[in-house]
Image (tube, helix red, strand yellow):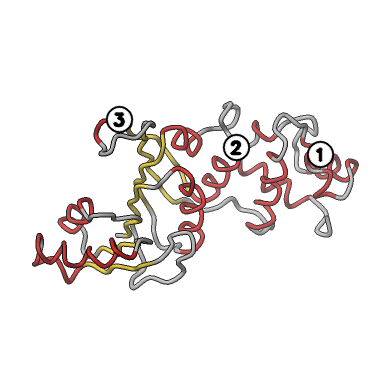
Amino acid sequence: MLEIGPGLGSLTLALLEVAERVVAVEIDHLLAAALPQTVADRAPDRAAALDVVEADAMRVTELPAQPTIVVANLPYNVSVPVLLHLLATFPAWHRGLVMVQSEVADRLVARPGSKIYGVPSVKMAWYSRTARVGSVPSRVFWPVPNVESGLVAIERTDPPATTAGRDRVFAVIDASFAQRRKMLRAALSGLAGSSAAAISALEAAGVDPTARGETLTVDQFARIAEQLPTSG
């Protein structure tokens, strides 16, 4: 089990009760240094099952063991980049449960057509199925924050079957949402090389050129990426 941001270790201790092994990634030097002793004091029989990695979760590329489950309490400003990095870097983990700010939780699980459906929603869908499975009121934290939190369950799935690489599909997604409410024929004109080329690619992918990014599924974005000129 991979835990991101263990802090003082209260969740770490609970995870060690049920996990064969816990790898905790902590960016703060003092917290990372203190965690092994905390576990040794409070759960000495499980101390050997803990590995602490002092690193930035957005940049970590190597771990003592490949995780199969991810658990994290992620701060608002890094939650989406951290999740996407972990999904791309450690393909062995197949499910996870993360706590994020309530609004971020809603975006991670948003479906096409929703007002909050956007880049995080689509990129998460490339890797996984997501579902909001709970809410956490601010009063349970100390100090009490000004935001509510939400729990998001993640179940890894196969990416869309496509001849376009992930980077190419993600470039299409980014361009499609760069200016919300813009028709795809205009939003993708830069990536395609021209508006005419964008229209041609969209029509070949079976997508209405006047549609907007917020209405498309990840599979549709993948089909568009297949049709766009590679030199675009």
Q: Quadrant of residue 21?
A: bottom left
| 227 or 65, nearer to the observer | 65
Q: Amino acid at mark 2?
A: Gly
| 198 or 44, nearer to the observer | 44
Depth check, mark 2 against mark 3: the one in front is 3
Q: Earlier in the sequence, mark 2 or mark 3?
A: 2
Numbered disc 1: secondary structure:
helix
Estimate the spatial distance between the alpha carbons at disc 2 and disc 1, rounded to whole Å. 22 Å
Badge 3: few (under 14), some or many (20 or more) residues near its Cα, within 10 Å?
A: some
Numbered disc 2: secondary structure:
loop
Position of residue 133 measured from the top left corner of the image (x, y, whole percent): 34, 34
Label 1: which residue? 203
Position of residue 120 measured from the top left corner of the image (x, y, whole percent): 55, 43
| 112 or 2, nearer to the observer | 2
Numbered disc 3: secondary structure:
loop
Judge from the rendering whether residue 100 lies leftward or rightward of residue 121; answer left or right: left
Q: Earlier in the sequence, mark 3 or mark 1?
A: 3
Residue 137 is labelled as 3
Q: Quadrant of residue 145?
A: top left
- Residue 56 vs 204, above or below: the answer is below
Q: Residue at x 18, y 52 (%)?
A: 14
Depth check, mark 2 against mark 1: the one in front is 2
Estimate the spatial distance between the alpha carbons at disc 2 and disc 3, rounded to whole Å. 25 Å
Q: Residue at x 38, y 31 (%)?
A: 146
Q: Earlier in the sequence, mark 2 or mark 1?
A: 2
Residue 61 is labelled as none
Position of residue 87 measured from the top left corner of the image (x, y, whole percent): 47, 56
Depth check, mark 3 against mark 1: the one in front is 3
Report the quarter where the N terminus lies. bottom left
Residue 118 is labelled as 2
- Residue 93 vs 219, above or below: the answer is below
* Residues at discs 2 and 1 in contact (Cβ within 8 Å): no
